[in-house]
Image (cartoon, rainbow, N blue to C red):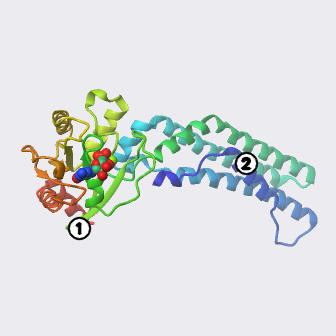
């Protein structure tokens, strides 16, 4: 995911790198001893500044541009971190870059007029001291800044631009088994901020388009009143992302939840998710057919999976958002 590529802000490392690399500068040109000495001192001032600037600039460049993010990812970011705080931290990094540039320029200007070794070294050391203290100013924000990166790394790699089928239902009804049956399985993401178990993402291809299927354990598997604010926000972000909701129920005797409880959750989710839904009765080999269900399947032995897929395909192809989504793809 894009957040992983953002370098961690470590001021000590940047300072060490800048000073140790610039102390190893080798001059290739010829000249008198004093010309070379001056050249070397000025090179140290500019080279160390360039290394610091490049390290900081890399953080700014790798940071996703909030205005260009898809809505789902942006919603997730807003749930997890304080966006205004990130903006001010990024501003401070940018400001530090500008200050380093200024110190570099002023020091080089001073050095132009100098000849003797001691004064040149003094200016160079003064510049180093200023670089270091400018960087240390960033220590105030580095912990919180790096912490946000850690949190955002856990945002699942799904985008509002994907056509997405969301699988919901109480725990243990067979959501993950169904997902693995209908998609090219993908590794599950280890950590997801709203759950402890991770999120499952798979996909299949329909009419030349990749359709994403997601199962979000811990997010869409309990009634609303059992949720905290963050979970509710996560639910609505997923509702915004979903193009189709598949709700799985287990009506077998082994189910931990009554059919009534399961249907209540389905009704709740239907209010939150305005898109087409499919009510799937799973574990059919263990239970009687159940009249409310749109389709009855066994994810375990494969019964009814073809009928389910036909139903899913027909929902997708009659869905206006899919038509628009396809047109978009072909236009580009
Ligand atoms: N008998 C039977 N067991 C199933 C079926 N689908 C899933 N299971 C089992 O039910 C349990 C929970 O399945 P899982 O997919 O992990 O449920 P999830 O918590 O909703 O993701 C597992 O032991 C599955 O093997 C089915 O159609 N029939
Ligand atoms: Mg599961």
258 or 24, which is in the foreground? 258
The N terminus: image quadrant: bottom left
Classify residue 264 as left or right of residue 191. Answer: left
Residue at mark 2? 15
The picture places residue 261, in percent across and down from the top left corner, at 19, 33
Query: Which secondary structure lies at badge 1?
Result: helix
Query: Which secondary structure lies at badge 2?
Result: helix
Q: Answer whether residue 193 is visible to the viewer in this image.
A: yes
- Residue at 67 percent across and 49 percent down: it is 101
The picture places residue 145, in percent across and down from the top left corner, at 56, 40
* Furthest residue toward left: 291
57 or 263, which is in the foreground? 263
Indicate the quadrant where residue 232 lies: top left
- Residue at 21 percent across and 46 percent down: it is 248
Residue at mark 1? 330
- Residue at 15 percent across and 60 percent down: it is 313
**Earlier residue among tags 1 and 2:** 2
- Crowd band around label 2 with a 10 angstrom C-alpha radius: few (<14), some (14–19), many (20+): many
- Crowd band around label 1 with a 10 angstrom C-alpha radius: few (<14), some (14–19), many (20+): few
Classify residue 83 as left or right of residue 245. Answer: right
């Amino acid at each position: 995911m894009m957040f992983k590529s953002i370098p961690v802000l470590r001021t000590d490392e940047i300072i060490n790198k800048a000073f140790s690399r610039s102390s190893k500068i080798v001059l290739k040109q010829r000249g008198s001893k004093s010309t070379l000495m001056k050249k070397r001192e000025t090179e140290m001032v500019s080279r160390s500044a360039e290394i610091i600037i490049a390290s900081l600039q890399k953080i700014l460049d790798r940071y996703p541009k909030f205005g260009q993010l898809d809505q789902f990812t942006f919603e997730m970011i807003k749930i997890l971190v304080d966006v205004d705080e990130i903006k001010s931290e990024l501003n401070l990094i940018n400001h530090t870059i500008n200050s380093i540039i200024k110190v570099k320029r002023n020091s080089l200007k001073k050095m132009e007029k100098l000849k003797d070794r001691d004064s040149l070294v003094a200016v160079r050391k003064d510049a180093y001291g200023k670089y270091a203290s400018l960087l240390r100013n960033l220590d105030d924000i580095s912990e919180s800044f790096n912490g946000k990166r850690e949190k955002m790394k856990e945002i699942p790699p799904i985008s509002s631009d994907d056509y997405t089928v969301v699988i919901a239902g109480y725990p243990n009804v067979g959501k993950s088994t169904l997902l693995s049956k209908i998609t090219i399985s993908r590794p599950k993401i280890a950590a997801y901020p709203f759950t402890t178990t991770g999120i499952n993402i798979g996909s299949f291809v329909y009419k030349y388009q990749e359709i994403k299927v997601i199962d979000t354990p811990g997010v869409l598997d309990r009634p609303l009143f059992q949720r905290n604010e963050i979970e509710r926000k996560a639910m609505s972000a997923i509702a915004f992302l979903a193009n189709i909701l598949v709700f799985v129920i287990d009506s077998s005797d082994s189910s931990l939840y009554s059919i009534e409880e399961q249907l209540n959750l389905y009704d709740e989710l239907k209010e939150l998710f305005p898109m087409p839904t499919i009510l799937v009765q799973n574990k059919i080999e263990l239970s009687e057919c159940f009249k409310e269900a749109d389709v009855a399947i066994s994810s375990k032995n494969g019964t009814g999976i073809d009928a389910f897929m036909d139903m899913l395909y027909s929902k997708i192809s009659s869905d206006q958002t899919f038509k628009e989504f396809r047109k978009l793809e072909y236009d580009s």
